[in-house]
């Protein structure tokens, strides 16, 4: 499936644009002094194209700081006038859109908590109809690619063709080192079905702490994402929201200078020829894997029939444990990652269960 969106290239609507595009600024606009001081330091780096700041902050629980409100838009106006940086804010309803545009905000973004709700996205889209303004859409909180695509489509159908996606990670029940699991495959899948859509990575929200940001930022660049949105505060330790995940302007510069920028293609013919040869080897192996998988499922089909005819349950826990133990040991001996191995086995097992369930619900045809 290919996603058909009418989109203008990123470099046509963000100027000046560096490589990679860098959007930076505090999680929340707290005071005029804080925002202006941060903005001036970011402008002095020569690496930041867009100043971001949270004006309205959707918080998980009431009673927490929920943003300074509309007065912060005036501070952004002043920061833009004094530094020349473009500005960007999150909007969560039609009123936010109206106020942000009236204050000259250059770019709007739809947050993860809004993307998850089609009613909210549609309200924002309706408020944008007939207005030419760039919009960025964050992935929904939960890992649902259709919701992300749906939000992008709603905004695009409203006439917005200066459009980008923001990959900020997904909530997960599993406790890991990240605040939000990157689930890179979701962003890769979006990029695959809509290659012209710019995707900007938000390592701040993925990581939840500043120590991991360099790792995620580099991986995003390696996956050919067009830019980074990084929360930056003049004094991160005193930030009113998300203090642990914000960088100082100085640390931001160090991070950007440390990134290894790579090209999508190489002009080196020797490299291209060798890469083509290796890819052909992979294609051959992939064909063999698919063929063997089909053969495996044919045997699964026979097992399903045999279980059905003998009134035996589909799930055999002892057998599944045996498979996992043996395959894990074999995979480790072959230097395969244990997490990859487990995911692969669980996927195959799930398809086997589905196939056998289908057979169990099919009546046997008795021979005369």
Image (tube, rainbow, N blue to C red):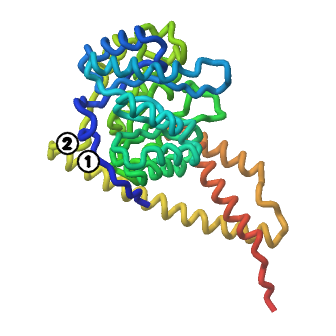
Left or right? Give the position of 187 relative to 180: left
Residue found at the far right of this picture: 311
How crowded pointer 2 is (Cα within 10 Å; few <14, some 14-19, many 20+) is rated as: few
Question: Is label 1 in a helix, a strand or a loop?
Answer: helix
Residue 349 seen in the current view: yes
- Residue 343 position, x and y percent, is 58, 44
- Residue pointed to by mark 2: 266
The residue that appears at 65% across and 54% down in the rendered structure is 349
Q: Nearer the viewer, mark 2 or mark 1?
A: 2
Rendered-image quadrant of the N terminus:
bottom left
- Residue 97 position, x and y percent, is 46, 36
Left or right? Give the position of 41 relative to 138: left
- Residue 60 position, x and y percent, is 64, 27
The residue that appears at 45% across and 40% down in the rendered structure is 137
The reply to whether discs 2 and 1 touch (Cβ–Cβ < 8 Å) is: yes
Q: What label sits on residue 306 in the rendered view?
A: none
Look at the picture and state if 318 lies above or below 243.
Answer: below
Question: Is label 2 in a helix, a strand or a loop?
Answer: loop
């Amino acid at each position: 499936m290919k996603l058909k969106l009418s989109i203008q290239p990123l470099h046509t609507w963000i100027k000046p644009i560096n490589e990679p595009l860098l959007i930076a600024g505090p999680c929340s606009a707290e005071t005029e002094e804080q925002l202006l001081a941060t903005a001036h330091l970011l402008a002095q780096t020569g690496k930041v194209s867009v100043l971001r700041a949270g004006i309205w902050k959707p918080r998980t629980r009431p009673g927490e700081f929920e943003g300074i409100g509309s007065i912060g838009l005036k501070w952004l106006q002043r920061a833009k006038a004094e530094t020349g940086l473009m500005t960007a804010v999150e909007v969560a309803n039609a009123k936010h859109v109206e106020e942000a545009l009236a204050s000259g905000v250059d770019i709007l973004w739809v947050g993860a908590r809004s993307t998850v709700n089609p009613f909210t996205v549609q309200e924002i889209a309706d408020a944008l109809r007939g207005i030419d303004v760039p919009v960025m859409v964050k992935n929904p909180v939960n890992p649902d690619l259709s919701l992300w695509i749906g939000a992008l489509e709603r905004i695009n159908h409203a006439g917005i063709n200066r459009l980008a996606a923001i990959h900020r990670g997904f909530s997960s029940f599993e406790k890991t080192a990240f605040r939000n699991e990157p689930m890179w495959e979701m962003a890769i899948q979006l990029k695959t079905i809509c290659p012209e859509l710019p995707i900007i990575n938000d390592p701040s929200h993925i990581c939840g702490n500043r120590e991991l940001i360099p790792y995620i930022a580099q991986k995003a660049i390696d996956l050919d994402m067009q830019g980074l949105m990084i929360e930056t505060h003049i004094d991160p330790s005193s930030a009113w929201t998300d203090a642990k995940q914000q960088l100082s302007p100085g640390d931001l510069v160090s991070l950007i200078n440390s990134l290894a920028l790579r090209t999508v293609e190489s002009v080196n013919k020797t490299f291209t020829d060798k890469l083509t040869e290796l890819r052909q080897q992979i294609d051959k192996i992939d064909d063999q894997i698919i063929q063997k998988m089909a053969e495996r499922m044919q045997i699964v089909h026979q097992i399903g029939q045999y279980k059905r005819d003998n009134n035996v349950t589909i799930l055999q826990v002892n057998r599944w444990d045996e498979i996992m133990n043996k395959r894990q040991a074999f995979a480790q001996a072959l230097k395969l990652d244990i997490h990859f191995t487990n995911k692969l086995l669980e996927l195959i097992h799930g398809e086997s269960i589905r196939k056998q369930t289908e057979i169990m619900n099919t009546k046997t045809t008795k021979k005369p």
